Amino acid sequence: MAATLDTSIQYLKGVGEKRAALYKKLRIFTVRDLLYHFPRGYVDLSAPYSIMEAPEFELCAVRARLVGKSREQRIRAKLSIFKLVAEDYTGRLDITMFNCGWTVDGLKEGEEYIFYGKAQGNLLKREMTSPDIYPVPKNRVILPLYPQTAGITSKMIRANIEQCLSECGPPDETIPADILSQYGLAGIGTAVKDIHFPLTIEDAKKARERFVFEELLLLSLGLSMLNAENLRKTVRPMDARDVARFYKHLPFRPTNAQCRCIGEAIGDMRLSTPMNRLLQGDVGSGKTLVAAACIWFAHQNGRQSAVMAPTEILAEQHYDTMRAFLGAFGVKVELLTGSTTAKKKREIRNGLITGETGCVVGTHALLSGGVEFFDLGLVVTDEQHRFGVAQRAKLSQKSESAHVLVMSATPIPRTLSLIIYGDLKLSVLDESPPGRKKVETLLIGGQKRARAMGFVRDAISGGRQAYIVCPLIEQGEAETALKPAIEYEKHISGTTLKGFRTGLLHGRMKPAEKESVMRKFKNGEIQALVSTTVVEVGVDVPNATIILIENAERFGLSQLHQLRGRVGRGEHKSWCILVSDAKAAGTRERLSVMKKTSDGFQIAEYDLKQRGPGDFFGFRQHGLPALKVASFADDIAIMQSAGDAAKRILESDPKLGKSGQKSLKQAVLAMMETAGDRPN
Ligand code: ADP
Ligand code: MG
């Protein structure tokens, strides 16, 4: 049987069960997946550098003769190193390879190779750590580099892709022919060949452009189709009420920004099309109050509200706040989460269906079948992007005839939110409540880590708490310079922070475990919490005054800003310590933006301009599909044309039901299915 695009790659010649399992880690299951596994870059081997001419700290190809290789040296159980020496007419290159027996075995002394990596050194010699090593090419000079996993090299991936292409041919064309020609895009056959095996870098660029367009077209289509469904709904409009009466019962004066956002939302709720509004405000800007005002307004109109939060702790937090804000108006507020007892749940459901309960706060437990409302008028979701796609679909069903207010602290530049959210209206809380203290931000190198940890210890001894954030969960096979949370916590609990209560939080823990750790941190049982970025959003621990972030260079600025927002929430002075050994000037400059400003939007704009291809922060955080090729930094222009093209396609075929659009529709659905995946 001939292989097709849907054939499992396991049945490809040269793949087999074992390698298929490795491919699975890269989320590659079928031939199609493999063909869409694009290079993360290319090595141009046509003009390699000599050793001493190689630029420092930059990925580049160096051509040199291998003159020596050491035996394997075992450092510890999972770590072995090899030393290689190469030379050319300009000098000497010392190479260190980690865990690479299989690569090193195949190298012959006396042969010339291309070493692709970052060189550094002095006038006398250069060094490289773990470069990719290639034989000097005979004909093809542009080699694709793939995102790899331990055990699959770019070379294997290249061979497998070559085979897929020859056995199965290219995937189906998704982009309609008229659009291809209007925008001068490469067809799928050429594009798939050129993105993997270009003859020139130009060809590769052209191919990439096509896939960027395709990806953004699918995204635009998917989002427009979702939005169109919302526009078709109608709701009963609400009547005007005097908000001053609500303000009078608050413990503080609302900021101007809060008043404006409340006005905007209430304006929407008086219409017969459902409100679909995103309330964006930096951490601590007071979004909850805006939500409370809307709930009050709905209640004044005899309508119920539901508030949904991504975790139990956040739900509890909102429950307390809402009771405080709304109690004076006789709004009955209830809390419904997974750990509510069956008896209590029954009571709450009863109150909701009779209409006695005016507001229910909860987790996705709210979405379960049994929860029904007497007259639901408003749904508020906090950090909606933390919910899965299925949950959001359910929520949208539940809120059929309700207004929707989405709150998010993930700042996203205005230009972008329009494109991403289409008709979703935006309210921005661009003003902090008075009296907020600025978090002091420090940027240090690893050599000062010990001092920083001493500072952490002092703060904890003084009764405060600290977060420590690491970029990795666990030490992988390959030796990297990244700090893994699990090992880190183990280490500090036995050394610097011995005798203190430390805790660990990461994305591979079960939700209940995570909740329990967060709770312990919240009530002070844990003094120092080592965590991956899962702490990014949410919980209010005013007693935490330090957040120390390891490998700060690995995070987007917006993400660092979010993390920084975990501290500075109480009466004590707070610090954010960024630890980074990155030497590149660009990286230092990027990180120092954190010292200069505490304005989330400014940071997001800067981030957007600076981030490399494909990893605009905030995208997946907004529950949108992961983009594999497109980058918001570089592809704004393509995004515009892809958006226009999407509009045109939908004008003549709003549901993509025409037979000619079958593969387009399939691709749109497949992409939307990936929305909201969160690896960390
Ligand atoms: P976020 O936007 O991060 O959700 P919150 O709604 O949790 O922010 O508000 C942060 C803190 O600021 C809360 O303790 C809240 O009571 C307080 N707050 C909100 N609005 C004001 C205001 N206008 N004046 C003073 N404090 C306020
Ligand atoms: Mg909040």
Image (cartoon, grey):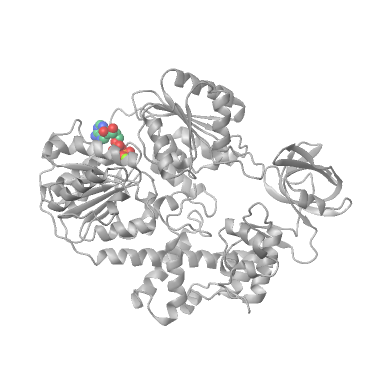
Above or below — where is 620 with respect to 586? below
Above or below — where is 23 with respect to 431? below
Q: Work out which quarter of the rendered image holds the N terminus and state it.
A: bottom right
Q: Position of residue 564 (x, y in %)?
A: 43, 35
Left or right: where does residue 431 sit relative to residue 7?
left
**Tally of numbered tags:** 0
- Between 193 and 342, the one lying in front of the other is 342
* Residue sitting at x 39%, y 45%: 410
Q: Position of residue 576 (x, y in %)?
A: 46, 30
Q: Quadrant of residue 97?
A: top right
Q: Position of residue 192 (x, y in %)?
A: 60, 70
- Between 425 and 14, the one lying in front of the other is 14
Does residue 245 show up?
yes
Q: Position of residue 317 (x, y in %)?
A: 29, 37
Q: Residue furthest front?
A: 343
Left or right: where does residue 197 sit relative to residue 360?
right
Above or below — where is 492 with respect to 347? above
Left or right: where does residue 437 sit relative to residue 234?
right
Q: Residue furthest bottom?
A: 659
* Residue sitting at x 35%, y 34%: 540
Q: Quadrant of ligand 2?
A: top left
Q: Residue furthest right?
A: 110
* Residue sitting at x 20%, y 50%: 349
Does residue 536 show up?
no
Above or below — where is 279 with respect to 579? below
